[in-house]
Amino acid sequence: MPKQRTPVSKIKEVLRLKFDCHLPNRSIAACLKIGGATVSEILSRFRTCDLVWPLPDGLTENQLEAWFYQGRRPVKGKQMPDFAACHDELKRKGMTKLLLWQEYQLREPDGAYGYTQFCVLYREWVKKQRRSMRQLHTAGEKVFLDFCGPTLPIINPDTGEVRQAQIFVATLGASSYTYIEACPNQGQESWLMAHVRAFEFFGGVPQLLVPDNLKAAVTKADRYDPYLNENYQKLARHYNTAILPARPYHPKDKAKVENAVQVVERWVLMRLRHQVFHTFTSLNQALALLLKELNERTFRQYPGCRRSRFDTLDKPALIALPPHRYEYTDIRRAKVGPDYHVLYRRHAYSVPHALVGSYIDIEAGTQLVRLYHRGQMVAQHPKALTEGGFTTLAEHMPESHQRQRWSPERLLSWGESIGSATRAVVEWHLRQRKHPEQAYRSCLGLLSLVRKYGDARLEKACQQALLLERPHRRVIMNLLLNRREETETDVTQEDVPVEHANVRGAGYYH
C-alpha cells in the first residue's frame, strides 16, 4: 500500500502545538494520535521550505500542501495530455493507450510525460469524471422491484426432485420498507402475482413501479422508449399506477432495490441455508418471520426502523387498493388456422369461420378463455386443461360442416321425424357397430333416400325390412327401387306353412 499523506489540517495543528504551545514532539504525537516520526518529518519539511510561522493569511490548503510536498508537484514544462480526446479515441475498436501516448509524444517531444505516468494520470482523470447523483425519494412515489441472484432449493420428499425457488424483492423508496416472496420461477405469472401480494402487504399502491428489464416486465429493452409487456401494463391499469423501467445496464437507477437485494441475501437467505424446505408454503412462512425482523430492525444511521418510517412516510401516501383483486390473465396473439381454431397451450379453441387467416388476441384467465378480434370479443370458452384437444362451438362452423357434425341422438331424431320404423332401422345400425361413429355413413345414406322417395315410401320400406328381419340399407333400396314396399302379401306367404300331399310331415318318421 502506498504511504498516505498527512492531512493539511493535521499539519497546521502540529505547527500550532509546536510553535504556539511549545510542546515536545512526543506530546504532540500523543495529542494528535500520530507517530513521533510523522511529527519530526512535518517539522523538517517546514524548516526546508520558505514558510514562516504564523502562516500567511492568504495561504490556501492546496498551496500549503504544494510547499510541503514539493517533490510531488507537477514537473515544470510538462504538457498535460488531452485526456477527454484520449477517452473518446479509446472507444474505437483496436485502439490502445500505447498508441495514444506515442502520438502525444510526437506532438510534445520536449514536454511529454513517460508512458507509465501517462497511464497513471489518465486513470486519475477517469475517476474524476464519474458522477453519482443522490436520489430524493418522495413518500409513496416509487416501489423498486427485482429478483435476488441466489436461490433456495425446494426438495420433493417423495421423488427427491430439487426445484430452485426465485426470491422476489419489492422495496419502497422513502422508507425502504421491504417485501420478499419465494416464487417457482421468474415467469410472467409469478412476477405479476408477486406484485399483487406485495401491494396487499403494503396496504396500498405507489405511483410508480420501477422494475428491472426482465422479460416478464419489458418485452424489448431500450434506454429511451422500452416496450412494456402487455400483461404488465394491464396490471398497472388495474391498480391505477404507472411503470418506469430502469435503464439497461444502469443499476443505480434502482439502487434502492439493489441494496435491498443485498440485505435480503445477507440477512435472510444466509440464515436459511441450513434448513430444508419441501414446499413453497413452508419457505414463504420462514421468509415472513425473517422479513418481520428485518423491517423492525433499528437503523444504524437514522432514527427508527423500516416499519416506523413506512408508517410515517409511505403508508399515508399510497394509492388505495381497488375493490377487486387483480386476476392474472395470460395475453397472447395467434393466427386463426383453416380449421377456424386458434391454439393456446396446445388446446384448440374455435372462432367464427369468417375469421380464418386473421389474428386473434387471446386473454386466458383462470376459468375462461376470451378471444378478441380488433378489440371486440368474438368467442368465449371454458378453459381446458387437456392438451391436444378441441373446444368447438357449432355456430362457429360453416353450414356445410355443421351438416357433417353428427351424433347418435341427432340421427335418431331425424329418423323419428320420418317414422317409428325408420328410427328403429337407424337404431339397429348404431347397435350393430362396435363404435356408433362407424355407422354414421350407413345411417346418413339411409336417411338421404327421403330426398328421392319421400317420407311415406321410406317409412313403409323400413317397415317391410323389419318384417323381413333384414333392415340393411341395400334391402331398403331394393324395395324402393322395385316399388315392393307396399307388397305385404309376399311377406306373409313366406311365413305360412306349405300343405301338400307330397309333403310327408313330421309324423312320417315316427
Image (spheres, rainbow, N blue to C red):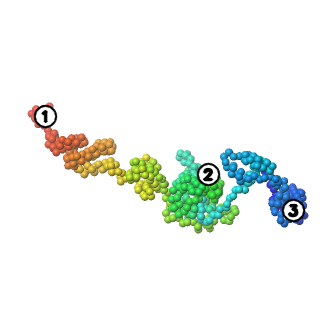
Q: Label 2, secondary structure: give it.
A: loop
- Residue 300 visible somewhere in the drawing: yes
Horizontally, residue 173 falls left or right of residue 327, namely right
Mark 3, residue position: 15
Q: Earlier in the sequence, mark 3 or mark 2?
A: 3
Horizontally, residue 13 falls left or right of residue 301, namely right
Q: Earlier in the sequence, mark 2 or mark 1?
A: 2
Whole-Å distance between the Cαs marked 1 and 3? Answer: 156 Å
**Position above or below: 407 against 57:** above
x, y (%) of residue 497?
Answer: 14, 38
Mark 1, residue position: 505
Residue 149's tag is: 2
Q: Which circle, 2 or 1, is nearer the viewer?
A: 2
Q: Amino acid at mark 1?
A: Gly
- Residue at the image point whose x is 49% and y is 63% from the top: 324
Q: Earlier in the sequence, mark 1 or mark 3?
A: 3
x, y (%) of residue 114?
Answer: 79, 48
x, y (%) of residue 43?
Answer: 88, 58
- Residue at the image point whose x is 83% and y is 63% from the top: 59
